[in-house]
Amino acid sequence: MSGAETDQPVILVVDDDAKIRNLVVAYLRAEHYEVATASDGPSAVDLVRSRQPDIVILDVVMPGLDGIETLRRIRTFSDVYVIMLTARAEETDKVVGLSVGADDYVTKPFSPRELVARVKAVLRRLRSTAVAGPASTDRVLTFPGLTIDQDRHQVILDERAVTLTALEFQILTALAEQPGRVFSRRQLLQAVWGWDYVGDDRVVDVHIRNLRKALGDDAHAPRFVGTVRGVGYRFEPEPVA
């Protein structure tokens, strides 16, 4: 886990609204998490660098440096798990946030208990991944034009390295470990986010779109990630023998 050297998870809460910030902090501390706070984007970026939190809860709407631009800056040096807080009516905020590297989102107004449940689920998944590692025993997956090295967290496409977020890499690996199998959104959520994920399954679509963009893939003539209309997604090529 990224949160420093102790066993105590560190959660960073970023919101310019002190009432919301204090409410979230109170619920998290009641679960005995270590909580850091920021009321603006630049402070949040500095705290991610210095504290290396396990999860960042980041509000989209903040004066000055908003949540989207804050996330862009964080993603230049960290793959920390980010949950964005978005206004219920602003679908654009959700899509843009996911497109620039958010892992998930919660809409306002939200239940603090639901947010804490989401945090617990993420931490369980991060712990199990760190302890057990991926289930596959094949650490390098090789396909025509594409190599996925799970130990190095590296993807080579046509002899050049491709940069993926942690979630994009996990989605690609989950699909590529079982070429030809069709995964529903819910199955991908269970494979990547965890069986106890309680959010919106549409996050899968945005992350798939980002993954295709990174791979130079065409949804209408897919080289790697295909869509099975009304069902889900599958990895198209067969592995190199």
Image: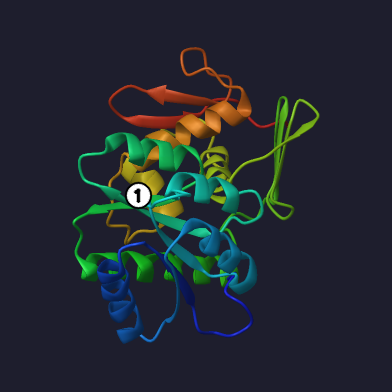
Residue 4 at what x, y percent from top left? 62, 77
Q: What coloring was used for the rendering?
A: rainbow
Q: Is residue 166 left or right of residue 196?
A: right
Say which residue appears at 38% left-offset and 87% top-offset: 32
Pointer 1: residues within 10 angstroms few (<14), some, or many (20+)? some
Give the residue type that dot 1 points to.
Answer: Val
Q: Where is 110 relative to 147, above or below?
A: below
Q: Where is 40 relative to 72, above or below?
A: below
Say which residue appears at 64% left-offset and 82% top-offset: 5
Which of the pair 56/122 is nearer the observer?
A: 56
Residue under label 1, please give it.
61
| Extreme-front residue of the structure | 64
Q: Where is 43 relative to 227, above or below?
A: below
Say which residue appears at 54% left-offset and 48% top-offset: 170
Say which residue appears at 62% left-offset and 41% top-offset: 164
Residue 81 at what x, y percent from top left? 49, 59
Q: Is residue 75 left or right of residue 56?
A: right
| Extreme-top residue of the structure | 221
* Number of callouts: 1
Q: Is residue 50 left or right of residue 66?
A: right
Label 1: element kind: loop
